[in-house]
Image (tube, rainbow, N blue to C red):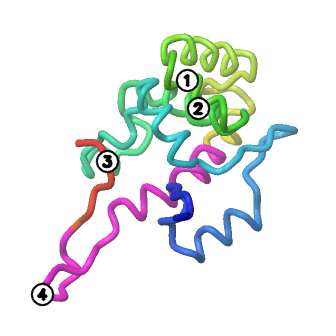
Amino acid sequence: MKPRHTLTDDIDPSIQMAREAAPVTVGDIKFEPITARRLYAAQGMGLRAFSLSPEDRDKGASYPGFIADVVTVLWLCAHPASTAIDALASPREALEKAMAWGEEKDIQPFSKTFPDFMAAYGGLLNPIMEQDSAPVSGEDGEGSKKKRRSGG
């Protein structure tokens, strides 16, 4: 039987080892790594991060819906992997739960904990975002082409 493939299988081994060595946490919340299942659910719930152009990505947290992206990813990673399946089946209901959770955890700009949640979001997605736009070798051996895993 062929092993099951997850998004984390594609991450550079050194990045994966670093993620496993230092789990992403905020207070008593431990976030599980973003997996393909969680990413699919986040996209179904309206995640915009992977649909941004490289220029918009470089702007950082200045796109409409950024806070919703943060809450969506963190909520999915703070809950069991099976939550992603439920979110795929009912994305609006899942988004409502995620937003309520985000309000409960005070994930909003200018809150005392917001920088910690931002660091967690970055710790979960940045390795994938960096790999997603990393140079890849073309047929001519040059590393000038960019790859995009999903989105626009």
Specify start and end residues of the magenta stretch as a single range: 119-145
**Percent coordinates x, y for residue 151 in the rendering:** 28, 42
23 in relation to 121, above or below: below
Q: Mark 2, residues whose alpha carbon is within 10 Å: few (<14), some, or many (≥20)?
A: many
**What's the mark number on residue 126?**
none
Residue 114, located in which quarter of the rendered image?
A: top right
Give the amino acid type for the residue marked by disc 1 in the picture: Ala
Q: Are marks 4 and 3 in contact (CB under 8 Å)?
A: no
Along the viewing direction, whichever of 90 and 49 lies nearer the viewer:
90
How far apart, in angstroms, are the residues tagged by discs 2 and 1? 5 Å
Residue position for label 2: 84
Q: Which residue is mark 4?
A: 140
Circle 3 residues within 10 Å: few <14, some 14–19, many ≥20: few
Question: What is the secondary structure assignment of the residue under circle 4?
Answer: loop
The Cα atoms of the two marked residues, 1 and 4, are separated by 42 Å
**Mark sitting on residue 87:** 1
Which numbered marker is on residue 150? 3
| Real-space Cα separation, disc 4 to disc 2, in angstroms | 40 Å
